Amino acid sequence: MPVEEFIRSRVPWSTEPSLKVKTGEVGVDFDAFIKAVEKDRTNYEMAQEFGVSSNVIAHLKDHFMRKGLGSIMGQD
């Protein structure tokens, strides 16, 4: 008897909040953050501009560099 295999279509899902959500949670303007990254501003410069610690900026930059704007996983 042949084994039938069904692949169900699933909507992609996120494993964690998007960068836009994360910047919003710490009070950093998302669009301004992306522009600052584009200009290759230092963590210190960005921390001063956005009124947060350099560690917060480092975390946000790390998310952007490793996962992009969001971390969507799943199968279509």
Image (tube, grey):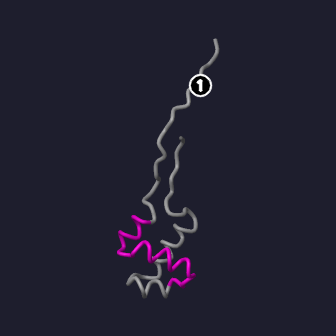
Looking at the picture, how far across and down is residue 17, in whole percent? Answer: 42, 59
Residue 42 picture quarter: bottom right
Q: Main secondary structure of the magenta part?
A: helix
Query: Which amino acid does the dot numbered 1 rest on?
Result: Glu
Q: Residue at x 60, y 20 (%)?
A: 4
Residue 31 picture quarter: bottom left
Looking at the picture, how far across and down is residue 23, in whole percent? Answer: 41, 70
Q: Is residue 46 magenta?
A: no
Looking at the picture, how far across and down is residue 49, in whole percent? Answer: 42, 86
Asked if residue 40 lies left or right of residue 70, the reply is: right
Q: Residue at x 39, y 81 (%)?
A: 52
Q: Nearer the viewer, residue 61 or 55?
A: 61
For label 1, the residue is: 5
**Circle 1 residues within 10 Å: few <14, some 14–19, many ≥20:** few
Q: Nearer the viewer, residue 38 or 26?
A: 38
Q: Is residue 22 magenta?
A: yes
The residue sitting at the top extreme is: 1
